[in-house]
Amino acid sequence: MAFGRLASAKPDAPMSDINVTPMVDVMLVLLVIFILTAPLMTSAIRLDLPQAEGAEAGSSPQAVSLVVDAQGALFLNDKAISPEALRLRLAEVAKRNPNTELELRADQTVPYGRVVEAMGLAQKAGLTRIGFVAQTPVTGTR
């Protein structure tokens, strides 16, 4: 036996396949981010909703959202609207489908009279199904 080099194998050819594992990891992280942020995007108007115990709201076949913020401003489907324009829009909605439900979200600091005015506009427009949206109280914090 002589000293020297052992016979070496042929060098490996460069890999020509794309490694998709990092791309899949990034896509899964983005998916998790979208899943976590989607519920936060449902309503962009900050409200301090009153708390009430009750059953979870069922999903209605068709609904419009009316928000009365702390300053008493009106928002229909998260868009600012004047009382006169609101009356016209609600009349259009009632004409298309009289069974449409109005989801009323009012800040708890809003005077009750302002909420009743909003309800009156909806009833005059022909919407009779009005649902009040509230938060469920947090238990065990006291």
Image: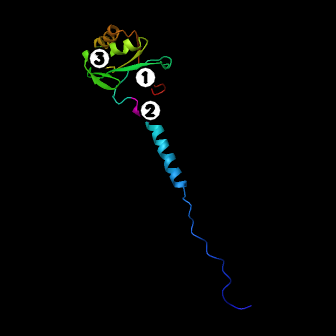
Residue shown at 46% from the left, 25% from the top: 138
Question: Is label 1 or label 3 in front?
Answer: 3
Task: Please say if 16 is above or below 29.
Answer: below
Instruction: Estimate how packed mark 3 is, as few (under 14), some (14 to 19) or many (20 or more) residues with alpha carbons within 10 Å.
Output: many
Q: Position of residue 22 (x, y in %)?
A: 52, 54
Q: CA distance from mark 3 to mark 2?
A: 26 Å
Task: Please say if 5 is above or below 31.
Answer: below
Q: Position of residue 45 (x, y in %)?
A: 33, 28
User: Which quarter shows the C terminus?
Assistant: top left
Name which quarter of the figure residue 13 lies in.
bottom right
Q: Which residues are magenta?
A: 38-42
Instruction: Estimate how packed mark 2 is, as few (under 14), some (14 to 19) or many (20 or more) residues with alpha carbons within 10 Å.
Output: few
Q: Is residue 39 found inside the magenta-colored segment of the image?
A: yes
Q: Residue 135, which numbered label? A: 1
Question: What amino acid is found at the position of numbered circle 2 in the picture?
Answer: Pro
User: Which quarter shows the N terminus?
Assistant: bottom right
Residue shown at 34% from the left, 15% from the top: 92
Q: Looking at the image, is mark 1 or mark 3 earlier in the sequence?
A: 3
Q: Residue 39, which numbered label? A: 2
Q: Position of residue 71 (x, y in %)?
A: 26, 22
Residue behind mark 3: 86
Q: Is residue 68 found inside the magenta-colored segment of the image?
A: no
Question: What amino acid is found at the position of numbered circle 3 in the picture?
Answer: Leu
Left or right for 82, reference 59: left
